[in-house]
Image (cartoon, rainbow, N blue to C red):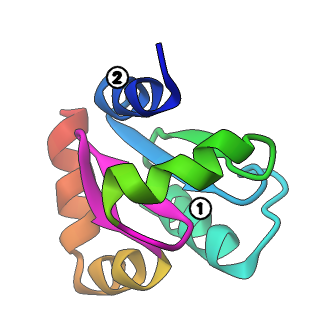
Amino acid sequence: MDIEEKLKEQIKENDVLIYMKGTPYEPRCGFSARTVQILIDCESQFSYVDILENNDVRATLPKVSDWPTFPQVFIKGELVGGADIIAQMHESGELKKLLDSIES
């Protein structure tokens, strides 16, 4: 399985997935830290991939998602966005509704 297929499989198999710099416990950039904190605030269960430990992912994911920056948050197989979009959705309450709808 090539890296593109592997990424598509990861995205499909995880209800909430964040591709980030570092880990939720040790984020390695402010945008990743902020995004993880928002997911935690929403009481979401999520999976993550540390792109700093996976250069193939870091190089290939922007082609798969058509999104150039990290973090990238996928919910139910769809790219929702990066830190700014997630923050806007959180402030409006839209993110919590979306996350609650998949966990019920």
Q: CA distance from mark 1 to mark 2?
A: 19 Å
Q: Residue at x 43, y 33 (%)?
A: 4
Please provide percent x and percent y for residue 54. Answer: 73, 40
Residue of label 1 = 36
- Specify the quadrant of the image occupied by residue 90: bottom left
Q: Nearer the viewer, mark 1 or mark 2?
A: 2
Q: How many marks?
A: 2
As helix, strand or loop, the secondary structure at mark 1 comes to: helix
Q: Is residue 79 magenta?
A: yes
Up the image or down, 12 lies above or below 61; here it is: above
Foreground of the two, 23 or 4: 4
Up the image or down, 16 lies above or below 74; here it is above
> Could you tell me residue 29's position as x and y percent?
76, 74
- Residue marked by disc 2: 13
Question: Do the residues under discs 1 and 2 have CB atoms within 8 angstroms?
Answer: no
Along the line of sight, the residue nearer the viewer: 100 or 25: 25
The magenta stretch spans which residues?
Answer: 67-82
Q: Secondary structure at mark 2?
A: helix
Q: Residue at x 65, y 41 (%)?
A: 56
Among the 4 quarters of the image, the one containing residue 34: bottom right
Left or right of residue 40: residue 81: left
Horizontal arrangement in the rendering, residue 82 relative to residue 104 (left or right): right
Could you tell me the amino acid type at mark 1? Val
Q: Reply above or below: 20 against 70.
A: above
- Say which residue appears at 28% left-offset and 47% top-offset: 75
Closer to the camera, 98 or 13? 13
Q: Label 2 sits on what residue type?
A: Glu
Q: Quarter holding the C terminus?
A: top left
Badge 1 or badge 2: first in the primary sequence: 2
